[in-house]
Image (cartoon, rainbow, N blue to C red):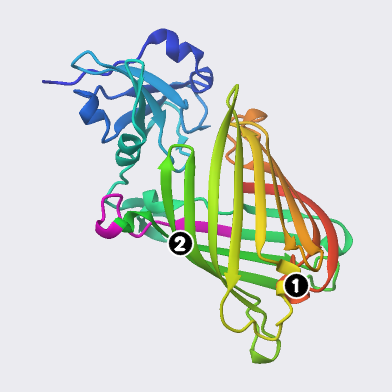
Amino acid sequence: MRRRLLIPIAFLAATPAAAQGLRAVPAQPASEAEALRGVEVFLVNEGDLAVTDAGPREIEVTAVDGTRLVLERAPGPLPTVAPHGFAKARYVPVSVAGRAVPPTEQHAAAEIPQGEAVVQSATGSSAAFVDRFEPHEPIYGAFGLKDAGGKLQVSFAFRPFGEKAPLKLGNLRFAYTQTMFWALNRPSGPFRSTNYSPEVYADIPFDDTTKVALGYRHDSNGRGVADSVDLNRVFLRAEKRFDLGGDWHLDVAPQAWFYLGRLGTAPDVKNYFGYTSLTAAIGQQDGLKLSLTGRGNFETGKGAAELFVSYPLARIAKGVGFYIFGQAFTGYGEALDDYRRNDTHARIGIALTR
């Protein structure tokens, strides 16, 4: 049977993407069971300007067998759709004919594609398993006055195994974060310090709002034996999302850890980093987000707090694919090289992820 493309006209008219000239057209699945493997949605740009948009968060479609499905956009890169062109997105069902899809079925539906994505770049053809990459910590560049200087961060996580890999290997993640401090107030503007943070962990979902991560993280200033600062930690993190209504949500993530091995030339670093942290973030889909993380040592009374504030520029200027970003830090250990130094800095810039 040849499949029809179907989406309610009234729904399309109400979506922000449609208001920008981007129309979401889902392929019609044969049944609920087929939809659980993911539904391909074509994002058609009917306007005269390029649009950077992932499409509406939810759409409704009727399967060939008559089952009504509510589909939600799966995580993935934000596409830029050329004028009168199209891009593909992937959606998974979140409810069927008024019945919520069980968390186990939602999780199974999130199976990542097995193939690589190939693009043409300035250096020729490039390829990657793009759908296996995930945002981790924010990617940003922010700049402040005087000794605040610039703070640049790159971070990502990677899923080496598919969702249905044996021994629960589909939960495994490799992640890497690098934070660089740019001394713009000094002659020639050197990078004064860099934090390197690789980690490996298992991300274990309990339902669609709760998950637990268990892993190992290494933090280093990249120095030699004489002035190395190294933290090796095994951590346990819980994450819970609360729906506040109106597309607002609250994420809470407590974390605890213990240290392994030597700490380089900084045996007292535990006094400043402590053994626990707590992150709380409140935000709206395609809107404002505020995130605050605090960590410290209750015995010494030393610690730190970091605030992130972000807002998508696409809400101000259509087609812009990044965030206006503010970052503030107070306390000890922003840069590992100066972990005994109590600093307060504020910066503003742009972020690619948040």
**Labels 1 & 2 near each other (Cβ < 8 A):** no
Cα distance between the residues tagged 1 and 2: 25 Å
Q: Nearer the viewer, residue 68 or 29?
A: 68
Outermost right residue: 146
Q: Nearer the viewer, residue 136 or 326?
A: 136
The local secondary structure at tag 2 comes to: strand
What crowding class fits label 1: few (fewer than 14 Cα within 10 Å), some (14-19), or many (20 or more)?
some
Residue 145 circle label: none
Q: Nearer the viewer, residue 193 or 191?
A: 193
Quadrant of the rendered structure where residue 232 is? bottom right
Q: What residue would you read off at disc 1?
A: 271
Q: Is residue 149 visible?
A: no
Q: Residue at x 29, y 34 (%)?
A: 38
Q: Position of residue 311 (x, y in %)?
A: 67, 37
Provide the residue span drawn in magenta. 154-167
Q: Which amino acid, by three-letter code, is at mark 1?
A: Asn
Task: Let me know if residue 165 is in the magenta part.
Answer: yes
Q: Is residue 178 left or right of residue 6?
A: right
Q: Is residue 137 above or below residue 53?
A: below
Q: Is residue 304 above or below residue 48?
A: below
Q: Is residue 277 left or right of residue 118?
A: right
Quadrant of the rendered structure where residue 261 is? bottom right
Outermost bottom residue: 226
Q: Is residue 158 above or below residue 9?
A: below
- Mark with earlier residue (1, 2): 2
Task: Let me know if residue 242 is in the magenta part.
Answer: no
Q: Which amino acid, by three-letter code, is at mark 2?
A: Tyr
What crowding class fits label 2: few (fewer than 14 Cα within 10 Å), some (14-19), or many (20 or more)?
some
Q: Is residue 77 left or right of residue 315?
A: left
Q: What residue would you read off at disc 2?
A: 201
Q: Is residue 115 visible?
A: yes
The local secondary structure at tag 1 comes to: helix
